[in-house]
Image (tube, helix red, strand yellow):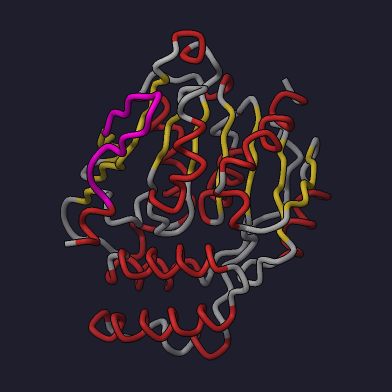
C-alpha cells in the first residue's frame, strides 16, 4: 500500500495549490504530472519551472525543495514512464522504455498543457537530466535554461550486477533488497541513502527489469553543435553513485554550459539550493 501512496495524490504545501494530472503522450501511455500554482498573484506571473526527477524517484525525496519553490513560481513536475505512477495500457516491453521514446514524452506533455518550452526553466536529475539533454540534441525542445544534476552519459551497472540484470522478474524483489544493502554500504550521504532505499522499494519490478535491460546499452552521443539552450551542470564531489567525469565532459562539450560545484547530491534536493540554481537561471535570461 505504501508504494501506491508514493505515486498518487496531489501533495499539499503551504502557499500554493497543486493539481494532479495524467497526460497521454502516446496511445495508452499516461504520465502523471503535478502542477503547482502559487497563491501569491505576483508569483503566478513568474517563469514556469519544470522538474524531471530521476529513475523511479519518488516525489517525497524532492519535498524539501519543492515545498519552498512552489510558493514563488509556477512549477510543473513530470514523472517519466518507468515510474509506477505512469498508467500504461496493454503489454509493456523493452521498446516501451527506449531513451528516445521516453525523452519524446516531455515536449508532448508541455504542449498538451499549453506551456511554451522556450519560456521555461527546466531542472532534470539523473535519468531526467539525460532525457532533457536528449531533447535538446534532437531539437525537440528549446528552453530558457536547463539545470542538470548527475546526468548520465551511460548507465553502467556494477560488474557484479551485470549477470543479474536479465534475471526473471520474480527474482527482482530479492535483488532489490541486495542493491539496497549495497547502496547503504557505498553511499556517503545519509539523505541520498534514504532516498534510494525508498525509490527502490516503491519501484515497479517489471518496469525496473525492463529499464535495466534497455539502459545498460545506452550511450549518449556527444554532438551538441545545434544546442543553443544555456545549460548548468551541478556536480557534487561527495556523490559516489554518479560518475563525476560525466558532468565534466558535458560541461566542456555543450556550448554555453557552466559547471556548478555543490557540496552534495542531497544539497540539490534542499531549499538551500534554490538561490544557487536561480542565480544561474537569471544570468542567462
Horizontal relation, residue 177 to residue 128: left or right: left
> Disc count in the image?
0
> At 29% from the left edge and 71% from the top edge, which residue is drawn?
205
Magenta residue check for 13? yes
Residue 130: x percent and y percent? 57, 52
Which residue, as the protein is rendered here, is positioned at the far right?
252
Horizontal relation, residue 155 to residue 247: left or right: left
Residue 165: x percent and y percent? 41, 82
Which segment did they paint magenta?
Answer: 7-20
Residue 146 drawn above or below residue 86: above
Magenta residue check for 131? no
> At 64% from the left edge and 36% from the top edge, which residue is drawn?
146
Quarter of the figure with the C terminus: top right
Residue 271 drawn above or below residue 100: above
| The one of 124 and 9 positioned closer to us in this rendering | 9
Quarter of the figure with the N terminus: bottom left
> At 17% from the left edge and 51% from the top edge, which residue is drawn?
89
Residue 234 drawn above or below residue 282: below
Which residue, as the protein is rendered here, is positioned at the far front?
14
Instruction: Name the main secondary structure of what is drawn in magenta.
Output: loop
Residue 92: x percent and y percent? 25, 61
| The one of 93 and 279 positioned closer to us in this rendering | 279
Horizontal relation, residue 173 to residue 181: left or right: left
When asked about the image quadrant of residue 263, the answer is: bottom right
> At 79% from the left edge and 47% from the top edge, which residue is drawn?
259
When asked about the image quadrant of residue 39, the answer is: top left
Amino acid at each position: 500500500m505504501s508504494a501506491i501512496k508514493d505515486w498518487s495524490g496531489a501533495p499539499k504545501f503551504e502557499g500554493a495549490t497543486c493539481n494532479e494530472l495524467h497526460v497521454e503522450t502516446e496511445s495508452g501511455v499516461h504520465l502523471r504530472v503535478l502542477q503547482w500554482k502559487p497563491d501569491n498573484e505576483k508569483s503566478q506571473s513568474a517563469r514556469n519551472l519544470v522538474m524531471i526527477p530521476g529513475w523511479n524517484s519518488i516525489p517525497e525525496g524532492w519535498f524539501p525543495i519543492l515545498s519552498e519553490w512552489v510558493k514563488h513560481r509556477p512549477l510543473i513536475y513530470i514523472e517519466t514512464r518507468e515510474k509506477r505512477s505512469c498508467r500504461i495500457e496493454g503489454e509493456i516491453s523493452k521498446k516501451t522504455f527506449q531513451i528516445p521514446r521516453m525523452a519524446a514524452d516531455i515536449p508532448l506533455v508541455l504542449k498538451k498543457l499549453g506551456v511554451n518550452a522556450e519560456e521555461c526553466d527546466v531542472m532534470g536529475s539523473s535519468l531526467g537530466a539525460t532525457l532533457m539533454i536528449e531533447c535538446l540534441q534532437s531539437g525537440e525542445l528549446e528552453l530558457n535554461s536547463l539545470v542538470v544534476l548527475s546526468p548520465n552519459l551511460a548507465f553502467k551497472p556494477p560488474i557484479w550486477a551485470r549477470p543479474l540484470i536479465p534475471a526473471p522478474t520474480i527474482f527482482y524483489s530479492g535483488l532489490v533488497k541486495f542493491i539496497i544493502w549495497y547502496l547503504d554500504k557505498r553511499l556517503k550521504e545519509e539523505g541520498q541513502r534514504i532516498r534510494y532505499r525508498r525509490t527502490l522499494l516503491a519501484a515497479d519490478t517489471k518496469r525496473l527489469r525492463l529499464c535495466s535491460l534497455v539502459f545498460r546499452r545506452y550511450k549518449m552521443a556527444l554532438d551538441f553543435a545545434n544546442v543553443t539552450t544555456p545549460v548548468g551542470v551541478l556536480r557534487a564531489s561527495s556523490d559516489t553513485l554518479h560518475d563525476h567525469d560525466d558532468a565534466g565532459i558535458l560541461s566542456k562539450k555543450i556550448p554555453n554550459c557552466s559547471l556548478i560545484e555543490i557540496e552534495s547530491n542531497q544539497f540539490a534536493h534542499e531549499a538551500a539550493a534554490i538561490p544557487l540554481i536561480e542565480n544561474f537561471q537569471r544570468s542567462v535570461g
